[in-house]
Amino acid sequence: MTPAARWAAAAQIMDEITDGVPAEKALTNWARRSRFAGSKDRAAVRDHVFDILRCWRSVAVLGGGTSGRELVLGRVRQTGLDVDTVFTGDKYGLAPLSDAERNAGDVPSGAAAADLPDWIYDIFRRDLGDDAHATAEAVRSRAAVFLRVNTLKADRTTAQNALSAAGIDTRPHDLSPTALEVVDGARRIAQSGPYLDGLVELQDVSSQAVVDALPLQPGQRVLDYCAGGGGKTLAMAARLRGPVDAHDADPRRMSDLTTRAQRAGADIRQVAAPTGLYDLVLCDVPCSGSGSWRRSPEGKWRLTEARLSDLHGVQASILDRVAPLVKPDGALAYATCSVLKSENEVQIQRFLSTHPEWICAVQHRFSLISGGDGFFLAILRRVGKSSTT
Ligand SMILES: C[S@@+](CC[C@H](N)C(=O)[O-])C[C@H]1O[C@@H](n2cnc3c(N)ncnc32)[C@H](O)[C@@H]1O
């Protein structure tokens, strides 16, 4: 495909997404009807679509509207490309721009320039203060690809050498001793020997740093209460060098976990109804995902105030339900991939105010500005006798 044809494909796909089709589905639909597209074409089209989704609001202003064609025009203007190399009128390219289209478009400002919905822009400014602008900018950019070295199977240098031999260049990242940032060859990872042999897992560096910060000791009884795909479960098992219980309200979310655990040589036990007592329970609760919107940009446009309010209720109820599962002197770790105070500090304050036998020992934000996703971690410790056990 020519570069112009790839942009034309992105315009078509954006029209489908605007009609309500999820981005991944729209990309799959396009790939199915475009058998001529090679892997490099598919990757380039995908990058265009996700770049537009991350910057959807600003490109709509720059392009003068929200049709696929206008969004592509806005993105092309944003990146400084010559519009006439994209709107070529060739067989597979987009039709040439009309005079009206050439004159349409404006310079985005405020929430549109930050590529956030108005109400979230206000929360960013209130919650993040001086970091609001840099955080919104980070959300507008592509995320780096990170690997976690599985210390059950390899150290970081061994994994790095094995990856290099497979054509994947990496460098260590300061935020976690297990993290490698991929600098070249990311698309080869899933088929590579080091990945298939369980030496490495795909995992964001902040997500790894959250697990590094947990007070894990070999021999402890540990539960991952919101295990999902099991990224943190596997990282905890590697640190513990022992078993970890995994639970999720939706067990289908854990469907790949057995295979992943086998590949990693980790001992993960799926538990439908956990019963106490545990030394440590991690609750990586469902949240707005605002710390990882650059990976899932549709999330920032889909989030509503009502949905956020529902999430607050779920987060609070998980904390309340899990507290009785923790041993006296044990730890309850609460994590989100959110940058919003209402899902983080406010939840911890609420929990402490209703559970006087608990204290907050650690509270930490992993900022998007440090290179990884935005995460929040609080480690709560039970210091008094619980009234519920
Ligand atoms: C942020 S995701 C977990 C990601 C996972 N820890 C990881 O690192 O890959 C949150 C998970 O919580 C689960 N969940 C939602 N409500 C829950 C509840 N009431 N109890 C337990 N898990 C719940 C969701 O199904 C989802 O898989």
Image: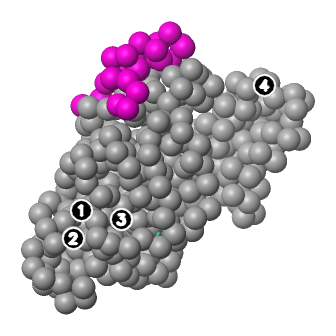
Neighbours of disc 2 within 10 Å: few (<14), some (14-19), many (20+): many
Residue 201: image x %, image y %? 47, 35
Q: Earlier in the sequence, mark 3 or mark 2?
A: 3
Tell me what residue is drawn at x 19 percent, y 90 percent.
387
Q: Are marks 4 and 2 in contact (CB under 8 Å)?
A: no
Tell me what residue is drawn at x 38 percent, y 53 percent.
244
Q: Are marks 1 and 3 in contact (CB under 8 Å)?
A: no
Query: Looking at the picture, which amino acid does disc 2 mark?
Result: Lys
Q: CA distance from mark 3 to mark 2?
A: 15 Å
- What span is in magenta? 151-174
**In the picture provided, is 47 more to the left or to the right than 20?**
left
Q: CA distance from mark 3 to mark 4?
A: 41 Å
The residue indicated by pointer 1 is 279
Q: Earlier in the sequence, mark 4 or mark 2?
A: 4
* For discs 4 and 2, the disc positioned in front in the rendered view: 2
- Taking the magenta stretch, the answer to whether it contains residue 293 is no
Q: Are marks 4 and 1 in contact (CB under 8 Å)?
A: no
Q: CA distance from mark 4 to mark 2?
A: 55 Å
The residue indicated by pointer 4 is 38
Q: Nearer the viewer, residue 241 or 333?
A: 241
Neighbours of disc 3 within 10 Å: few (<14), some (14-19), many (20+): many
Query: Looking at the picture, which amino acid does disc 3 mark?
Result: Cys
* For discs 1 and 3, the disc positioned in front in the rendered view: 1
* For discs 3 and 4, the disc positioned in front in the rendered view: 3
**In the picture provided, is 353 more to the left or to the right than 128?**
left
The residue indicated by pointer 3 is 283
Rendered image: mark on residue 327: 2
Query: Looking at the picture, which amino acid does disc 4 mark?
Result: Gly
Q: Nearer the viewer, residue 278 or 29?
A: 278
